[in-house]
Amino acid sequence: MKSMLNAWTAGKHVTIDESMIKYMGRAMSFMIQYMPRKPIKHGIKVFACCCAATSVFLSFEVYLGKENSTMESSAKDIVERLILSAHLTKHKGRILYTDNWYTSVKLAKALYEKYRWCLVGTISRTDKKVRNDDDVPFLKLSRGALVKVAKGSFKRATLPVITGTNAKYYIQCTTWSDKKQVMFLHTYLVEASKDNMVRRHVREQAQRIDINGPTIRQDYAQYYSAVDINDHDSAENTVSNRTTRWYLRVFFSFGYVIEQYLLATMLWCMLLQMD
């Protein structure tokens, strides 16, 4: 993997999410996970880091379960291990896209202050009434309150942060009313959101209508799904799902990654020849 990374340069946008390796065996039952929203719903869970523009795997970490892992299992620690193992921290200015499980104010601060990276991610809504420095400023809306809020409306709150070197940056939280309340935490595109039209189906009218959306929603939708795209491409892998040697399942599954690098290298050589 390290030698392949030397031949591949990741882009500005990077995505971290869970990936699934299709596996139905019982050799390591504690590793088997069920994730119904993933293209591969049953198998070995892997924390994966991808280039958001090309969906190429940059690093991964197999989930071993809380009882068997000797490393810190917090979302912030997993993110840092993935970007460090992919040798991505040599360059500043990258943007990381994450989902609810990874996104936090602590992660946003750590990425910017340590590596000068920006974070864009959805964050879990909370109904807590006790606030602290690392909490988001908006409360979770009840179903009754959400019905009364106009679909497409959004609000933002910006927090200025001063680093130890007196550098200043901003963390912004944007809450948006779609079919449900969606909340983004980001240190990128920290500004007054411009109207960004999104098409949504309305059951009562039996048609699609345009509603407003914040600028950060479009950016997140464009770059977040890289890991799921990779899962779609590898879902038809023909390696046997039932084997006692689960590590072979991991190895052959990531043979698809090697194929990606080979194709990218061939394309690059062709472009060089054309020049």
Image (cartoon, helix red, strand yellow):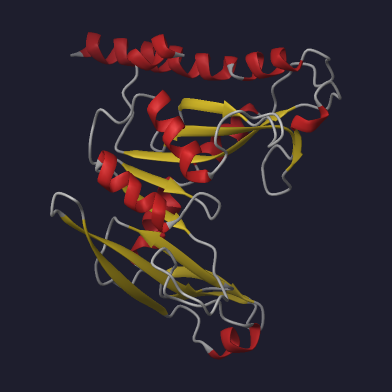
In the image as oriented, which residue stretches furthest toward the bottom?
Answer: 148
Tell me if 134 is positioned left or right of 71 in this view.
Answer: left
Q: Residue 124: name its quadrant.
A: bottom right
In the image as oriented, which residue stretches furthest toward the left?
Answer: 166
Q: How many marks?
A: 0
Q: Position of residue 146 (x, y in %)?
A: 57, 84
Q: Is residue 47 above or below residue 162?
A: above
Residue toward you, 107 or 145: 107
Q: Position of residue 109 (x, y in %)?
A: 33, 52
Whether residue 267 is visible here, answered yes or no, is: no
Q: Residue 85: name its quadrant.
A: top left
Q: Is residue 165 above or below residue 271?
A: below
Residue drawn 31% across and 15% down?
Answer: 268
Residue drawn 48% across and 59% down?
Answer: 122
Q: Position of residue 30 (x, y in %)?
A: 79, 32
Whether residue 240 is visible here, answered yes or no, is: yes
Q: Residue 228: name its quadrant.
A: top right
Residue drawn 38% across and 44% down?
Answer: 96
Tell me if 26 is positioned left or right of 93 in this view.
Answer: right
Residue drawn 42% across and 36% down?
Answer: 80
Residue toward you, 199 or 163: 163
Q: Position of residue 55 (x, y in %)?
A: 46, 33
For the C terminus, the image quarter is top left
Q: Is residue 121 above or below residue 110?
A: below
